[in-house]
Amino acid sequence: MIDHITFQSNLYAHRECNNRAFTVSPQEIRQFIGVILLSGYNCQPEAKYYWSTQPDMGAQGAISCMSRNRFMEIK
């Protein structure tokens, strides 16, 4: 399943977004899904707040697995 999502994500980026430089790995897809699951448990007004340095806002799980910029690129 992860391999299929990875393949389709790369295909979509190349065909629909005309972004040949974009590639995502199966590991990044797993991390991305993990952050999405975390967002259902730890609700924030915007995705960027998961990477906040404020103690009451940030989510260590998101911070430790991928950068905010990479998350937004994949999104």
Image (spheres, rainbow, N blue to C red):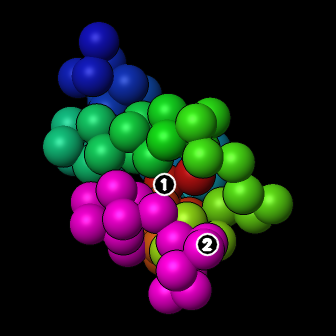
If the image is split into quadrants, where does the N terminus sit? top left
Given residues 69 and 59, the one toward you in this image is: 59
Quadrant of residue 7 within the rendered picture: top left
Given residues 32 and 14, the one toward you in this image is: 32
Q: Secondary structure at mark 2?
A: loop
**Residue visible at 46% across and 63% down in the picture:** 59
Is 70 contained in the magenta span?
no
Given residues 3 and 38, the one toward you in this image is: 38
Could you say which disc has been placed on residue 57 in the image? 2
- The part of the chain drawn in magenta is 52-67
Residue 15 visible within the image:
no
| Crowd around label 1: few <14 · some 14–19 · many ≥20 (10 Å) | some
Taking the image as shown, residue 30 lies to the left or right of residue 55, namely: left
**Residue visible at 23% across and 23% down in the picture:** 3
Residue at image mark 1: 74
Say what amino acid the circle numbered 1 marks: Ile
**Residue 51 pos. (x, y %):** 50, 74
Q: Is residue 33 above or below residue 67?
A: above
Q: Exactly how many numbered labels are in the figure?
A: 2
Residue placed furthest toward the bottom: 53
User: Distance from label 2 to label 1 (Cα)?
Assistant: 22 Å
